[in-house]
């Protein structure tokens, strides 16, 4: 018999819908049942692409003995951390505080009031059964002690979540952050720290912006070394494009094979910006291939982007992606297979498991035509293999990141299909995820979920809409971004100028989550700071700029202490110091910005925004009162809406931009 997950919009929850465990979704109904039955709540949190979540599901939650031990004595609640990041955040804070580490699947035991008194991660079946028995005993025999402990834990976590004092993120602080990153940089292999290595997308964006503002050769060198190492290694899909979640080793050889939308959207912009600065052919290729991966493998029929591809295929991690020398020979023939094995680092011993190897490309082959044909043949053969499952829920925040990445990539690389995909996605999110003037977190198959959007949903979506506005000149996206930011500032604002992760009228958890740290994606606070700053530059709103600067001050402590976990905060701070710098390209009716707009877009200045359109076009403040004399496209370079003399000469605009960013 199916349990109570069958109607969920979460693919992760649906994976558990036929478990003998009587799961139900997070909500007041579950806690009311726990109070009525006088039993604790067993909370299990994971996500669809999580390898160890699959392991625990198969060996533990599909087991009848486990269900018999769990169902009568607990209320079992399943949570998709990607659908309810607020629930995940507060109980992960408990897990790390109690155990010293975190991860997924996360396993917590709660009182019927939601306060945790036990927390852990993955448990093998035997250990899980022991845990259930021990909890039953202490719940029955030591209830008062359990309740005292849970109240103490919750109280300490509330104290720990209090915000640090705001401070400045000025030029000196940014220089110190860059110096701190340099000390942690792996010169030999790229990236920061040791294994496992995660793609440091936001840190790389900060370093690119720091280089643009200061000319720091060191900052650019760290980006180039890291981007080259990632793109050449097994963490990058050499056949299909796109990046895996992280590398289990320090050399970027063996990935944890899940491919996440948020990683690839952010890395797409990093490689695009690296190409803009250096002209790197590798960076351009990776940008195009990653954008194509998003469209081909993560695009949904409704126009959005799915969350992830699983690490596992048929229960085997990496099955789709790894090769042996014999498999290469079967596809390519003896000689060509041996040549490909040498090129791609496929050895008899293997670089992965059981004699299998990931594919690496340490250098481009001299025969580009041969490699293009070989890559296509291997790709086609790989497509005949079993494929990883896809988590096809559409998450607002991550689709906002994808909108920004695709819109900017389409504009800079002059690929309209990427801009068109960004436009379709923005339309879907707005039409589906906005319900009664509130932003929802997810949808699936065009059906919106019940969970409200959190702060990063608002910040990342606004970022995407503002980038799409600049790529298209369409006023609707600027207007909608402004609406999203109005909702965010009204519902998420904190007393110190920053932002909480949940709205003031959201479901009350045992503590209100708030994290200033940028981890795998921008924190809600820094995402909103960036979008507020860009909106200010496009509209002249000083209130938005003031709100952005206040949010950055609220994040300054973590940026000073751990710059690796403040990448987007630092990137936005670079834009504050460099801007606002605006380029308005006024065009005759029906005209385009042409080369003038391209010159503006190719400037790496962190504080620059640009837009093209007809003079006094409705909804485009930058173009108000800025004509195109004689019917010739004309550029206005402005600082805070105070403009230099207009020019129709791309060379003059390029020189003026270079002087403005020097």
Image: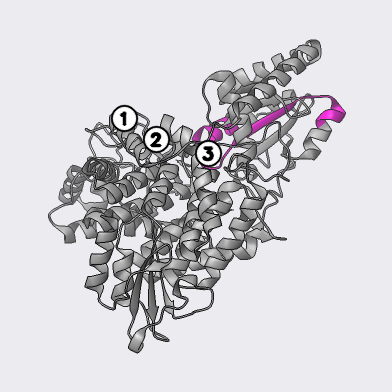
Image quadrant in which the N terminus is located: top right
Q: Which residue is mark 3?
A: 554
Q: Which residue is mark 2?
A: 564
Give percent across and percent down for residue 159: 63, 25
Give percent across and percent down for residue 639: 38, 62
Name the foreground residue: 605 vs 313: 605
Q: Earlier in the sequence, mark 2 or mark 1?
A: 1
Q: Which residues are magenta?
A: 34-58
Q: Nearer the viewer, mark 3 or mark 2?
A: 3
Circle 2 SS class: helix
152 left or right, relative to 194: right
Q: Nearer the viewer, mark 3 or mark 1?
A: 3
Give percent across and percent down for residue 5: 71, 44
195 left or right, relative to 62: left
144 left or right, relative to 55: right
In this picture, is 387 found above or below 637?
A: above
Circle 1 SS class: helix
Image quadrant in which the C terminus is located: bottom left
Give percent across and percent down for residue 313: 46, 43
Q: Is residue 250 visible?
A: no
Q: Are marks 2 and 1 in contact (CB under 8 Å)?
A: yes
- Residue 20 is drawn in which quadrant? top right
Q: Earlier in the sequence, mark 3 or mark 1?
A: 1
């Amino acid at each position: 018999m199916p349990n109570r997950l069958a109607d969920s919009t979460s693919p992760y929850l649906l994976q558990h819908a036929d478990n003998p465990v009587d799961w139900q979704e997070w909500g007041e109904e579950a806690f009311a049942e726990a109070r009525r039955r006088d039993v604790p709540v067993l909370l299990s949190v994971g996500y669809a692409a999580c390898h160890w979540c699959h392991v625990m599901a198969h060996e533990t939650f599909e087991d009848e003995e486990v269900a018999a031990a769990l169902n009568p004595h607990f209320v079992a609640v399943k949570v998709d951390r990607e659908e309810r990041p607020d629930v995940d955040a507060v109980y992960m804070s408990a897990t790390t505080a109690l155990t010293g580490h975190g991860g997924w699947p996360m396993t917590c035991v709660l009182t019927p009031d939601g306060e945790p008194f036990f927390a852990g991660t993955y448990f093998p079946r035997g250990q899980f059964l022991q845990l259930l028995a021990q909890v039953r005993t202490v719940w029955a025999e030591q209830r008062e002690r359990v309740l005292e402990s849970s109240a103490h834990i919750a109280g300490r976590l509330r104290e720990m979540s209090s915000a640090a004092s705001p401070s400045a993120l000025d030029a000196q602080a940014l220089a110190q952050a860059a110096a701190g990153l340099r000390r942690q940089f792996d010169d030999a292999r790229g990236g920061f720290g040791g294994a496992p290595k995660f793609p440091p997308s936001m840190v790389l964006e900060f370093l690119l912006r720091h280089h643009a503002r200061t000319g720091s050769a060191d900052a650019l060198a760290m980006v180039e070394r890291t981007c080259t190492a990632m793109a050449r290694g097994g963490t990058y899909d050499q056949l299909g494009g796109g990046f895996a979640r992280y590398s289990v080793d320090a050399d970027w050889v063996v990935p944890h094979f899940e491919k996440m939308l948020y990683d690839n959207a952010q890395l797409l912009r990093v490689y695009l910006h690296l190409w803009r600065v250096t002209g790197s052919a590798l960076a351009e290729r990776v940008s195009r291939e990653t954008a194509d991966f998003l469209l081909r493998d993560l695009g949904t029929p409704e126009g959005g982007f799915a969350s992830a591809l699983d690490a596992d295929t048929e229960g085997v991690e990496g099955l789709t992606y790894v090769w042996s020398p014999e498999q290469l020979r079967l596809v390519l023939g003896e000689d060509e297979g041996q040549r490909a094995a040498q090129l791609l680092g496929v050895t008899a011993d293997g670089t992965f498991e059981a004699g299998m190897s990931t594919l690496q490309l340490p250098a481009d082959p001299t025969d580009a035509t041969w490699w293009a044909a070989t890559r296509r043949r291997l790709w086609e053969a790989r497509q005949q293999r079993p494929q990883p499952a896809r988590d096809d829920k559409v998450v607002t925040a991550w689709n906002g990141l994808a909108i920004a990445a695709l819109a900017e990539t389409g504009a800079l690389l002059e690929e309209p299909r990427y801009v068109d995909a960004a436009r379709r996605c923005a339309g879907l999110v707005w039409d589906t995820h906005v319900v009664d003037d509130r932003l929802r977190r997810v949808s699936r198959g065009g059906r919106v979920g019940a969970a409200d959007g959190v702060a990063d949903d608002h910040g990342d979506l606004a970022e995407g809409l503002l980038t799409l506005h600049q790529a298209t000149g369409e006023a609707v996206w600027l207007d909608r971004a402004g609406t999203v930011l109005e909702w965010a500032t009204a519902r998420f604002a904190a007393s110190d100028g920053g932002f909480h992760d949940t709205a003031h009228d959201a479901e009350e958890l045992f503590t209100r989550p708030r994290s200033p740290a940028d981890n795998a994606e921008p924190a809600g606070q820094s995402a909103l700071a960036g979008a507020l700053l860009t909106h200010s530059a496009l509209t002249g709103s000083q209130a938005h700029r003031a709100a952005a600067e206040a949010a950055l001050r609220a994040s300054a402590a973590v940026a000073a202490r751990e710059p690796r976990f403040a990448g987007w905060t630092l990137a936005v701070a670079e834009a504050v110091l460099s801007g606002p710098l605006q380029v308005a390209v006024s065009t005759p009716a029906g005209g385009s910005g042409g080369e003038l707009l391209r010159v503006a877009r190719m400037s790496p200045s962190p504080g620059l925004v640009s837009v093209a359109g007809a003079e006094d076009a409705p909804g485009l403040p930058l173009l108000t009162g800025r004509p195109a004399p004689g019917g010739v496209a004309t550029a206005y370079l402005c600082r805070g809406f105070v403009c230099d003399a207009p020019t129709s000469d791309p060379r003059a605009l390029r020189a003026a931009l270079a002087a403005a960013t020097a």
